[in-house]
Amino acid sequence: MAELMRADVDGSGRKRKLYQGGEIDGGTMTQAFNRQFIKAAVGAVGYNLSEDNRGRVDLRDTQEVQARTLEYVQACELAGLLPGLSGLCGYSLHCSRQWLHKFKRENPRHETTLFLERVGELFADCISNAALAGASNAVMALFILKNNHGYMDKVSLEDVTEAEDEHEMTAEEIKRWLDGMGERYGFDAEAEGQEQAQ
């Protein structure tokens, strides 16, 4: 499989055809890759639950948080996976994201909070760079950035100013305008208005 992947990368510069199974075995390679990926991911969860019995980290212990974070990032590098806050909390810090966010809210100037803010920015940078390079699913990257890192769509509001030559039309001006439209397009505006009123 590695030889096929290397040949595909060398030949086209992309792995898409191999993973989609487009030109190799009608999709069987895709199914095999997906099964292997899921098996490895679930195996990592099982290993972590059975082998790592350190318990929840004390977030006030900045050095321990730093050591576990570095351990998690190195594991992501070895596995070829993008780091994320959910993984950091689940695999290394042994806490929920909600618990982590609560600590950061309650201790905004704590050294651990400042460190974790920097870690979050670096994770977001990894995710956005992977999406920009086409190495990850762009929609999922966008979801993660919005859900975990506070990204949002930019909304801009513009001041509305009235034009100098505009004015409110009186009822008589509206009637004359409608009559003119009726003549132009061949309908009786007054009769139309009466029909709708009934």
Image (tube, grey):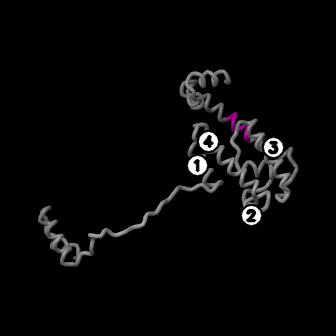
Could you say which disc has been placed on residue 71 in the image?
3
> Which is nearer the N-term, disc 2 or disc 3?
3
Disc 4 marks which residue? 129
Between 101 and 70, the residue placed more toward the observer is 70
From mark 2 to mark 3, how far is it between C-alphas? 24 Å
Between 29 and 86, the residue placed more toward the observer is 86
In the rendering, at what x and y percent does residue 51 appear? 86, 44
Disc 1 marks which residue? 142
At label 2, which amino acid type do we have? Pro
Q: Which one is in front in this view, the residue at disc 4 or the one at disc 1?
A: 4
Q: What range of the chain is rendered magenta?
A: 35-41
Disc 2 marks which residue? 108
Instruction: Confirm or deny contact between disc 2 and disc 1 (CB under 8 A).
Output: no
Element type at marker 3?
helix
Instruction: Confirm or deny contact between disc 3 and disc 1 (CB under 8 A).
Output: no
User: Would you call the spot at circle 4 few (<14 residues within 10 Å), some (14-19), or many (20 or more)?
Assistant: some
What residue is shown at x 22% (from left), y 78% (from top)?
A: 170
Q: Quadrant of the N terminus?
A: top right
Residue 134 lies in the magenta-colored region: no
Is residue 109 toward the left or the right of residue 64 in the image? left
In the rendering, at what x and y percent does residue 12 appear? 55, 25
Residue 6 lies in what quarter of the image?
Answer: top right
Element type at marker 4?
helix
Q: Quadrant of the C terminus?
A: bottom left
From mark 3 to mark 4, how far is it between C-alphas? 22 Å
At label 1, which amino acid type do we have? Leu
Where 106 sits versus 69, above or below? below
> Which is nearer the N-term, disc 3 or disc 4?
3
What residue is shown at x 62% (from left), y 40% (from top)?
A: 130
At label 4, which amino acid type do we have? Asn
Residue 192 lies in what quarter of the image?
Answer: bottom left
Is residue 24 toward the left or the right of residue 116 in the image? left
